[in-house]
Amino acid sequence: MGKLNWTTVDCFILLGITDAPQLQTLLFITFLIFYIFSFVGNLSIVTVVITDRSLHIPMYFFLGNLSFLDFFYSSTTVPKMLAGLLMDDKVISFQGCMAQLHIFHFLGSTEATLLTAMSYDRYLAICIPLRYHALMARTACIQLATVCWLIGYIYSLTHTILTSMLPFCKMNKVTHFYCDIKPLLKLACTDTSLNESLVSILTGFVALCTFVLIIISYVFIGSHILKLSSSQSRQKAISTCSSHLTVVFLYFGTAFCTYLRPATQDSLEQDRMTAVLFTVITPALNPLIYAMRNKDVKVALRKLNFKDFF
């Protein structure tokens, strides 16, 4: 336990997605396009949420937090991946690897809790509309968002500390395009069964708790919608939830597939492919999902001359 000087590895090599030269250029162009959409889309939503006073309500406060998170979430992994595809720059320092792991899981777990907060906001708005503004006052929104970010930070810090304390003796080739927990555990020259169990337990606890809370919120929302007499009221309630539900299933579907199963060599290969979805594609789709289905966001974006994008 005390042999921290076992860590003789001072850098890691990220193996990336593929070694085939004929695919690297195509993948670089494809992922660059998605990254640009993610960059522009999320930044523009953050901008309109801050600058447009008509969007200064709880729903858009949390949407702004989500877009801010996605903006940095994709930026944590995609630029390094693009550098590996274009310039074969796959080396990352030990400190850089741990920083990437920490930021990635910090933002990823925060997204799970933010999506839960957003479902709670929709529950209050639809099921308890008369008390909504009192319950979701500005102070309450800030406190709820702070708790979300704090849970994500503590969760990520736990994994980062445990992973950084492992001895890495010789092998330094990470079977991924970014530093993640499971491929790093495979490189440690010690028994990592405790770490693997903690990954499953902690990740399972956070993912299942947040997902169950979201489902409970939507059970109440669905029950309330069925009792509405006006079809217009039902349609309006459904439209305010559809974007959020789409993002929830995109996020939790990939998270469950990636982190709640044992780390075998085959699963690590599958994780690389799955990770492309939630690190490259989903952050680019989230702004489009919310902008295209939300009239207020589309109007605010048009004021900033983003007509061509939305």
Image: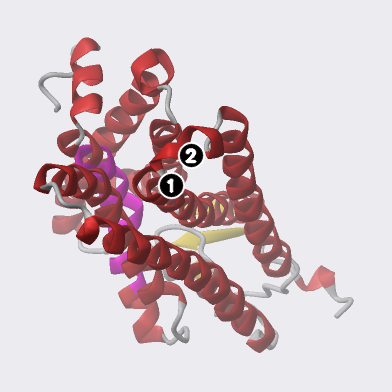
Q: Is residue 164 left or right of residue 179?
A: right
Q: Which mark is residue 260?
A: none
Which residue is rendered at x = 52% and y = 37% of the image?
136
Mark nearer the N terminus (2 vs 1): 1
Q: Quadrant of the C terminus?
A: top left
Secondary structure under tag 2 reads helix
Which residue is rendered at x = 21% and y = 61% of the image?
226
* 300 in relation to 285, above or below: above
Residue linked to disc 1: 124
Of 4 and 103, which appears nearest the observer? 103
- CB under 8 Å between discs 2 and 1: yes
Dot 2 crowding, Cα within 10 Å, few <14, some 14–19, many 20+ = few
Q: Is residue 221 left or right of residue 21?
A: right
Residue linked to disc 2: 131
The amino acid at mark 2 is Arg
Image color mode? secondary structure
The amino acid at mark 1 is Leu
The magenta segment is 271-289
The question of residue 129 being in magenta is answered with no
